[in-house]
Structures are given as C-alpha cells and as structure tokens.
Image (cartoon, rainbow, N blue to C red):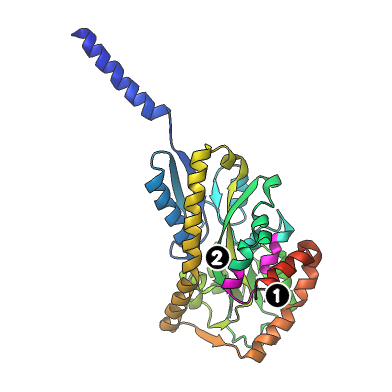
C-alpha cells in the first residue's frame, strides 16, 4: 500500500514536470502599430487564430496592436534583439537595411493594387524578401494595405496647393524627396504621433490609405482628402532570421503554410476594406473627399516623377523596369 501511494505521487510529479518544463510552446510576439480593424491588424489576428487551431501547445502567437509594445522606430531594433519575433513594417521603413525596397515607395509607380500583387509575386519581388538575411532579417511574405491618399486642411487639387505645407511622412528618404519635389515640407514622425501632430498643427497634412485614415480618425482633423492614389502602403512580414531557423522544421513548414493562407486572405480583402472605410468617412461628413480630374492627377505625377531618377542608382534601373512591367 505505501508503495502504491509513493508510485502515484511519483507519477503525479512526472506529469507536472513534463508540462512545466518540457515542450513549452514557442512564443511568437507579433507587434505592430495599426488598429485591429485594418488589413495588417486583421492579418495578425488571423495568423494567431490559425496557429492556435493547428499548432496548439506547440506555438503561441501574442499580438500587440496600436504601438502597444513597440512604436515604429523601435520595433526593428527589438526584432534584432529577439525581444519580439514577428513584425510587418511598412515597406517604407526598410531603407536602412536595404535600399532596394525603396522601389515600393516611388510615386505613381503602380497603377493599382493588382499590379502591386503581380510585382510582389514576381521573381524580383520574391528575391527582395531574402535581401536582408545578412542583417538578420528574413522576409516571409507581403501583406498589402492599399494606395495612399493625401489629406490636409486645405483642398489639394494641384501640386502647387501643397506648397509650403508640412506633411507627416514615414521614416523614408523616398517619401521625404517626394514632398520636397512638390515644394512641401516633409516631417518624419512615428505613426502613433500623427493624429496629435495634425491636431496641434505640428504638421498640416499626411498621406495614408483609407483604412489608416479611418481607424486613426485622421478625417476628424483634416478637412479634405484628395483621392490621389499616388503611392503604396504595403508590408513585409518579417522574422528574426536566427529565431526562425531554429524552429523545428516541421513546425516551421506549418507556420509557413498558415502564413501563406493568411496572405492570400489579407490581400484579397484589403482593397475592399479600404473602400468600406472610405464610405464610412463619407458618411461621417467630417472630411470632404476630392476626386481629381485626369489633368490634375497628371500634374501630381509630373511633379513627383523626378524622385525616380534621384533613387535610380540606389534601387537599380532593372528593378524599376521589372516593377513597371507589372502594370501590364
Ligand atoms: C505609417 O507609418 O504611416 C504606416 O507605416 C503605418 C502602418 O503600419 O500601416
């Protein structure tokens, strides 16, 4: 009898120690700066849900939206230190790591989001995912938000309307040059500070897709939104290379499969999500949406186009040509 009791106690200890020490799930902290209701926010939650369903007990994804863990400017550093394992920064935020990714921010490069997808899936687009491995960053996939619109408290119909206005930009040399090309004043500012920057007049205008305008309430502090579709906001889902390569192969394969599924879904829904946010902005009556005539839009294109030449050497003329081909 005492022996039986001891055996039972030992068995119990064994059970506990297995669950406490061995096979702890791999934790993937996924940090981002936008709201849950945006394409990226939805993608992160979808990834978390599918991992929960298919890799329960093996991998656990923790999502931190709205700059709640790291604001931009800090998140890439955190990834390299393995304090966070997955991010999806805007493609405008990589120029420190590889100048080639600046391609995505050239103004008026892509005709529409379908062309963006074609370029991302092309050999040239896919090779950019692996262009930062020597820096410890592995790109896994692209998630698109949408094309960007200009906003201000002034009606912007032609480039000259923007002259002298201060625009919030992401930390990107291309976007800095883009606003200088129209003789406006770019101000680099973290995403999470944009609303207040606009509200207090530190900056007068911004460029965002409708989903970010709506979820950040930018339309409440900007009287006009010009539907310019002049540039792109898309993301690269990235991981710390060493962390990723150390994940057991079978688990890594499953994570890749899940991520591929999520990417298809995000990229299928992102444009519609932006369109429905546009409608919500219209319905709010808080901001007026300006539609450009072809002639007006052509003026913006002409004014911003010199930026291409400025960055041609850093990006590569061949890569620019490959991207242009995606327009069909
Ligand atoms: C921005 O800073 O405007 C964007 O990169 C934010 C985002 O992640 O969509």
Q: Which residues are magenta?
A: 101-116
Q: Residue at 47%, 41% (x, y): give it.
A: 27
Of the pair 63 and 244, the residue shown nearer to us: 244
* Residue occupied by mark 2: 144
Q: Quadrant of the N terminus?
A: top left
User: What is the crowding at mark 2: few (fewer than 14 residues within 10 Å), some, or many (at least 20)?
Assistant: many
> What secondary structure is found at the residue carrying circle 1?
helix
* Residue occupied by mark 1: 179
Whole-angstrom CA distance, mark 1 to mark 2, is 23 Å
Question: Which residue occupies the extreme top position in the image?
Answer: 2
Of the pair 131 and 189, the residue shown nearer to us: 131
Horizontal and vertical percent position of residue 62: 45, 48
Horizontal and vertical percent position of residue 120: 62, 63
Confirm whether residue 7 shows in the render: yes
Task: Using the image, determine if residue 121 lies above or below residue 298.
Answer: above
- Apparent side of residue 293 relative to residue 262 in the rendered image (left or right): right
Please tell me whether residue 315 belongs to the stretch shown in magenta: no
Task: Using the image, determine if residue 80 lies above or below residue 106.
Answer: above
User: What is the crowding at mark 1: few (fewer than 14 residues within 10 Å), some, or many (at least 20)?
Assistant: many
Q: Residue at 45%, 83% (x, y): give it.
A: 282
Confirm whether residue 163 shows in the render: no
Residue 201, quarter of the rendered image: bottom right
Please tell me whether residue 111 belongs to the stretch shown in magenta: yes
Q: Residue at 48%, 45% (x, y): give it.
A: 254
Q: Is mark 2 within 8 Å of ligand 1?
A: no
């Amino acid at each position: 009898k005492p022996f039986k009791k001891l055996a039972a106690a030992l068995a119990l200890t064994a059970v506990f120690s297995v669950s406490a020490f061995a096979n702890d799930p791999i934790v993937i902290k996924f940090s981002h700066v936008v709201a849950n209701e945006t394409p990226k926010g939805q993608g992160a939650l979808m990834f978390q849900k599918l991992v929960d369903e298919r890799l329960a007990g093996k991998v656990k994804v923790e999502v931190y939206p709205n700059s709640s863990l790291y604001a931009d400017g800090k998140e890439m550093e955190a990834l390299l230190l393995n304090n966070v394992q997955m991010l999806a920064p805007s493609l405008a935020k990589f120029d420190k790591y590889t100048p080639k990714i600046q391609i995505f921010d050239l103004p008026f490069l892509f005709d529409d989001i379908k062309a963006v997808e074609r370029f991302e899936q092309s050999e040239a687009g896919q090779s950019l995912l692996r262009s930062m491995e020597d820096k410890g960053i592995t790109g896994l996939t692209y998630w698109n938000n949408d094309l960007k619109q200009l906003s201000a408290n002034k009606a912007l119909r032609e480039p000259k309307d923007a002259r002298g206005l201060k625009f919030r930009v992401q930390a990107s040399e291309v976007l800095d040059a883009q606003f200088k090309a129209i003789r406006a004043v770019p101000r680099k500012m973290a995403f999470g500070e944009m609303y207040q920057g606009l509200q207090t007049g530190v900056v007068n205008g911004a460029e965002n897709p409708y989903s970010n305008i709506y979820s950040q309430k930018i339309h409440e502090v900007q009287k006009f939104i010009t539907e310019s579709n002049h540039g792109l906001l898309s993301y690269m889902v990235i991981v710390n290379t060493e962390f990723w390569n150390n994940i057991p192969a079978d688990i890594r394969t499953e994570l890749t499969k899940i991520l591929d599924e999520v990417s298809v879904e995000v990229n299928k829904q992102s444009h519609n999500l932006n369109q429905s946010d546009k409608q919500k902005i219209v319905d709010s009556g808080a901001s007026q949406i300006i539609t450009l005539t072809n002639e007006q839009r052509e003026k913006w294109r002409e004014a911003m186009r010199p930026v291409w030449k400025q960055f041609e050497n850093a990006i590569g003329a061949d890569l620019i040509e490959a991207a242009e081909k995606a327009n069909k």
